[in-house]
């Protein structure tokens, strides 16, 4: 079964605003806004019987606040929130986080799927900038020459002790280029006006650029490093007309363990996935994150972020 | 401060007779503007900053510094500079060049109340483009350079809030005798004010309406050798030229206070004001309300005014001194006499913190409003009859409890609904810490909000930092739909707290604990009228108002509370969060980080406020006798040091306590 997790518009949902330390890369925004959106849906709109005999009610069945369509489960039940003003008022940026160990052809399908979700959410037919984040790449400004591929630099989330596996190794350029072809197609179809990548240093850019037909216009660098971006990269980017933008996302935005914990039956879970044999109603199986997409719509001439949110898609493989 | 119409100003007794007339015409003009502009939509964010300078004049030979009264000459030189005009700059009241569409437009200059002052603004408004933000500081530096280029070589445009020895003997050049007919001040001559008839009339009629001179008593800073009790040694009790000379004999000068007696002591202060254009009236009203509780915080954080009339004061900011310098309330209005001729007791000066909230926001609880707000009921009724909603009508009916001070006979002949002169007469002499500005008739301009509490800083780097910080805060407010509401009376209380010496590190301020609306699943919003699309949702259910806010340090308000979940996140982290949602290029982000870092460190005490630095400078000066006196020599060295800091921005070590290590 396919699980589609969504945050809805997180801009007015306070808890997701990142607190200190602000320069740390973090997936807190995603995880806390997912939780907040689940909680909001659990308590509304259909009143579930509360406080029976003075005791706190158990968590409502996930079926009351999720929707299954065919083989897809929307967590929570989702209604798009289209943008309020005419399309040309907005600057829409989408960032797609790929997961490791996914064949390039699947990833191409996923890309299309992610863009479609966002377009439908915002009620539009095009986006201005699509940035893709390949797994395992981590830019390090202190290491000028090489692109530093360091799995250790990803903060392993506490619940995620067992994740230091092959997940975090960077892919070779060829795999990336195969994926890039899909993006170029989206660009040709005018669904996306500009393309971007994240965390590319000079060396990787030099290998990557010659193989692209549509060049990336943007390379996103972690904000922590914005004052120490190596000169050569600045010069090279300028020369290639690539804009260096800042972000504060971590690359492995939704590790498997985190996802399992959020959906699980434990103290911090929302009770979609079964925790043991007793959870007869809940879903069983192995949950595997597929991709995460973040979208941001900014009213251009006012600098106001009107809509921002995430979709995360996972596969649930039922145990045979 | 632009120059309003010219004509024959009425003396106070005449002006008083037509006050009701002016008010009612002003209200009709307001209604006309409101009807025309209430549906204005989708205006871009445009904003502007105003920097005010003192023009100082060095007398190197005698190691003295005085205020230069050459404002008019300097403005004339600026208005006649061909090259400046060509670049779009100049003096709007006299002549300026055309705004450039694509190119940079040169800055423009304006007269101010004090004849020793100058104001400069960008030649055209800023937008939200991040590149625009980076132009602010260079533009401020450009303004100062241009200003300096049109001054005499011994003059310099300094950005101190007040001149340390204003009101002391021999503090202005050219010199004029004190005790003129307009101000009747025993410290400053009438020539201290801009000679444009509006300004002396304003000062004279405020005094006249009040029935006495204005009375400014600032607590003196008690140092080791300060005589105690302190009796201001500069007060002359033996003047007998004007009836107002009796003021001091009737106890106007308070013990342990520095005494001042003229509008120039307040309106001669320099500040840093920011004006924003909102996308529509709704957004303007929201910004007005949400920025209001930030006023006292920013006042304390920009504190820069520890000296008055040659004495160290025991306060750090200018606000209350200006408030008293233009306080035109009568004894009846002040509550010192029973009400007989006047209509009501008035708790605040015309220059004071806000007393109303105006946004039609479900989060605005009635409890936040002042139940004792004084309003003119007839005016409110007229506005309601004209179709205005209760909140906004209340706001203007509150502003309109005042009398117009300067009335020109010529303007009373015919009501012109395509003008705003009568409305502006009242609006622009209500100097609150926020100002809600309707669009001028017949212009493209949208609804605007002015943020007025900040004190000017010594360097353009700091002034740019605070300007940009406020701009980013407004964007965070609108993007996250932040809620800073606390009862308006608490905001006024905070304004008082901000005056306390070193309030930044010693005081706590009322502030809302949770600025977020409760998270609910987003609903479809068909009308599309609001941004963000979800609009303002009521945080249900309402708990007691007192539980919504608490006392916080400035550091907690700016940098966030550390007390785990649920603490106030801090204005800087909110701004960072906003920036993280935007596409910002690395160089811009790095520059913005410099500005935010200054504010972060001012708030946490790493860097000193200007007031603290100036006080320290005086107290460590070899000529200082620990008696609170800031004499000519200290004053000269202080102004010189300020100029030096303006130029080097701490790179040479001077002022590094305020600025840190600048690159």
Image (cartoon, coloured by chain):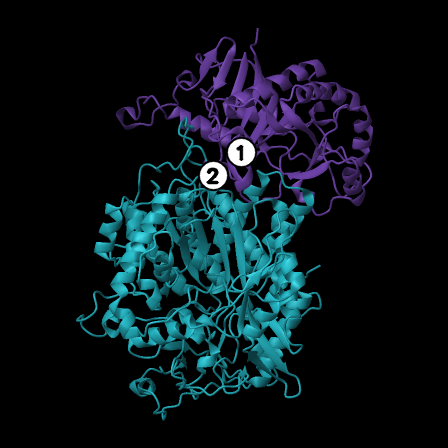
Chain colours: A purple, B cyan
Residues marked 2 and 1 touching at CB (< 8 Å): yes
Quick one: SS at disc 2? Answer: loop
Q: Chain of mark 1?
A: A
Chain at tag 2: B
Q: Residue furthest bottom?
A: B238
Above or below, comparing residue B548 to residue A121 in the picture: below
Nearer to us in this view, B661 or B259: B259
Taking B262 as reference, is B141 left or right? Answer: right
Relative depth, front residue between B39 and B408: B408
Q: Position of residue A188 (x, y in %)?
A: 69, 20
Residue behind mark 2: B42
Give me the disc on residue A189.
none
Residue B480, image x, y percentages? 47, 40
Q: Is residue B510 visible?
A: no
Q: Residues within 10 Å of mark 2 (few under 14, many from 20)?
A: some
User: Residue shown at 39%/47% (left/top)?
Assistant: B285
Q: Position of residue B598 (x, y in %)?
A: 60, 57
Q: Nearer the viewer, residue B6 or A117?
A: B6
Residue ranking furthest to the top: A320
Residue at horizontal 46 percent and vertical 36 percent from the top: B532
Task: From the image, tell me which residue sits under label 1.
Answer: A89
Residue A319 is drawn in which quadrant? top right
Dot 1: few (<14), some (14–19), or many (≥20) neighbours within 10 Å? some
Relative to A17, say whether A94 is above or below: above
Left or right position of B577 against A133: left
Q: Looking at the picture, do discs 2 and 1 lie on one chain? A: no
Work out how far the residue at label 2 is from the one at label 1, CA to CA, in angstroms: 9 Å
């Amino acid at each position: 079964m396919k699980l589609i997790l969504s945050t809805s518009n997180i801009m007015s949902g306070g808890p997701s605003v990142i607190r200190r330390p602000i320069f740390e890369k973090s997936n807190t925004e995603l995880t806390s806004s997912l939780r907040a959106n689940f909680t909001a849906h659990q308590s509304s709109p259909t009143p579930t019987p509360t406080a029976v005999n003075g005791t706190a009610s158990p968590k409502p069945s996930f079926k009351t606040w999720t929707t299954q369509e065919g083989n897809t489960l929307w967590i929570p039940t989702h209604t798009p929130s289209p943008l309020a003003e005419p399309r040309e008022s907005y600057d829409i940026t989408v960032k797609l986080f790929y997961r490791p160990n996914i064949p390039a052809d699947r990833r191409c399908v996923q890309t299309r799927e992610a863009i479609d979700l966002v377009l439908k959410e915002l009620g539009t037919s095009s986006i201005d900038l699509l940035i893709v984040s390949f797994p395992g790449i981590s830019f390090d400004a202190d290491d000028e020459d090489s692109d530093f591929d360091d799995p250790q630099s990803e903060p392993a989330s506490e619940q995620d002790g067992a994740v230091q596996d092959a997940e975090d190794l960077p892919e070779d350029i060829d795999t990336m280029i195969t994926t890039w072809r899909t993006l170029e197609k989206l660009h040709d179809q005018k669904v996306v006006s500009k393309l971007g990548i994240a965390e590319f240093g000079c060396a990787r850019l030099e290998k990557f650029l010659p193989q692209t037909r549509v060049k990336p216009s943007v390379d996103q660098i972690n904000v922590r490093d914005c004052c120490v971006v190596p000169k050569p990269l600045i010069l090279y980017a300028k020369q290639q007309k690539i804009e260096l933008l800042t972000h504060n996302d971590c690359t492995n935005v939704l590790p498997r363990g985190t996802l399992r914990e959020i959906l699980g039956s434990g103290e911090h879970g929302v009770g979609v996935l079964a925790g043991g044999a007793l959870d007869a109603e809940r879903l069983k199986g192995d949950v595997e994150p597929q991709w995460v997409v973040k979208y941001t719509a900014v009213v251009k001439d006012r600098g106001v972020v009107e809509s921002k949110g995430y979709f995360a898609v996972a596969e649930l493989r039922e145990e045979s | 401060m632009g120059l309003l119409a010219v004509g024959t100003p009425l003396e106070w007794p005449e002006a008083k007779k037509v006050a009701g007339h002016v008010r009612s015409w002003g209200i009709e003009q307001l209604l006309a503007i409101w009807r025309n502009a209430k549906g204005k939509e989708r205006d871009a964010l445009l904003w502007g900053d105003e920097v005010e300078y003192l023009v100082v004049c060095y007398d190197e030979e005698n190691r003295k510094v005085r205020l230069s009264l050459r404002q008019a000459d300097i403005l004339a030189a600026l208005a006649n500079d061909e090259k400046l005009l060509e670049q779009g700059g100049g003096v709007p009241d006299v002549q300026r060049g055309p705004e450039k569409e694509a190119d940079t437009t040169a800055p423009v200059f304006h007269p101010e109340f004090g004849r020793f002052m100058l104001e400069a603004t960008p030649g055209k408004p800023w937008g939200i483009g991040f590149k625009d933000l980076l132009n602010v500081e260079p533009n401020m530096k450009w303004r100062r350079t241009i200003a300096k280029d049109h001054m005499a070589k011994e003059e310099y445009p300094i950005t101190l809030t007040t001149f340390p020895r204003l009101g002391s003997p021999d503090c202005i050049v050219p010199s004029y005798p004190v005790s003129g007919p307009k101000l009747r001040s025993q410290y400053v001559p009438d020539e201290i004010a801009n000679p444009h008839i509006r300004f002396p009339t304003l000062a004279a009629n405020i005094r006249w309406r009040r029935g006495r001179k204005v009375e400014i008593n600032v607590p003196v800073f008690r140092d080791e050798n300060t005589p105690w009790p302190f009796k201001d040694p500069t007060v002359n009790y033996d003047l007998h030229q004007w009836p107002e000379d009796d003021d001091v004999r009737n106890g106007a000068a308070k013990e342990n206070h520095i005494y001042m007696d003229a509008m120039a002591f307040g309106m001669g202060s320099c500040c840093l004001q920011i004006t924003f254009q909102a996308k529509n009236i709704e957004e303007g009203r929201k910004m007005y309300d949400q920025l209001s509780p930030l006023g006292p915080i920013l006042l304390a954080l920009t504190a820069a005014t520890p000296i008055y009339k040659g004495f160290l004061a025991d306060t750090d900011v200018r606000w209350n001194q200006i408030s008293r310098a233009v306080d035109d309330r009568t004894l009846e209005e002040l509550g010192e006499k029973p009400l007989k001729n006047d209509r009501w007791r008035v708790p605040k000066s015309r220059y004071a913190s806000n007393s109303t909230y105006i946004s039609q926001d479900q989060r605005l609880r009635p409890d936040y409003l002042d139940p004792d707000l004084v309003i003119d009921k007839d005016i409110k009724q007229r506005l309601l009859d004209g179709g205005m909603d209760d909140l906004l009508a209340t706001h203007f009916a509150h502003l309109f409890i005042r009398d117009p001070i300067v009335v020109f006979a010529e303007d009373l002949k015919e009501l012109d609904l395509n003008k705003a002169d009568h409305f502006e007469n009242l609006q622009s002499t209500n100097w609150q810490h926020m100002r809600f500005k309707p669009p001028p008739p017949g212009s493209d301009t949208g609804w605007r909000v002015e943020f007025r509490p900040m004190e000017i800083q010594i360097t353009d780097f700091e002034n740019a930092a605070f300007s940009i910080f406020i701009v980013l805060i407004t964007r965070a407010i609108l993007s996250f739909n932040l809620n800073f509401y606390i009862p308006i009376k608490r905001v006024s209380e905070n304004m008082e707290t901000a005056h306390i010496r070193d309030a930044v590190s010693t005081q706590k301020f009322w502030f809302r604990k949770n600025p977020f609306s409760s998270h609910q699943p987003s609903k479809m919003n068909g009308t599309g009228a609001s941004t963000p699309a979800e609009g303002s949702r009521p945080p249900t259910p309402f708990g007691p108002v007192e539980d919504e806010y608490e006392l916080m340090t400035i550091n907690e308000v700016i940098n966030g509370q550390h007390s785990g979940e649920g603490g106030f996140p801090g204005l800087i982290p909110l701004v960072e969060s906003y920036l993280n949602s935007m596409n910002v290029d690395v160089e811009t982000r790095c520059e913005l980080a410099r500005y935010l870092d200054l504010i972060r460190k001012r708030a946490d005490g790493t860097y000193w406020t200007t007031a603290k630095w100036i006080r320290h400078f005086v107290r460590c000066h070899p000529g200082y006798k620990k008696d609170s006196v800031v004499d000519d020599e200290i004053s000269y060295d202080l102004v010189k040091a300020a100029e030096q800091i303006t130029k080097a921005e701490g790179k040479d070590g001077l002022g590094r306590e305020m600025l840190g290590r600048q690159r």
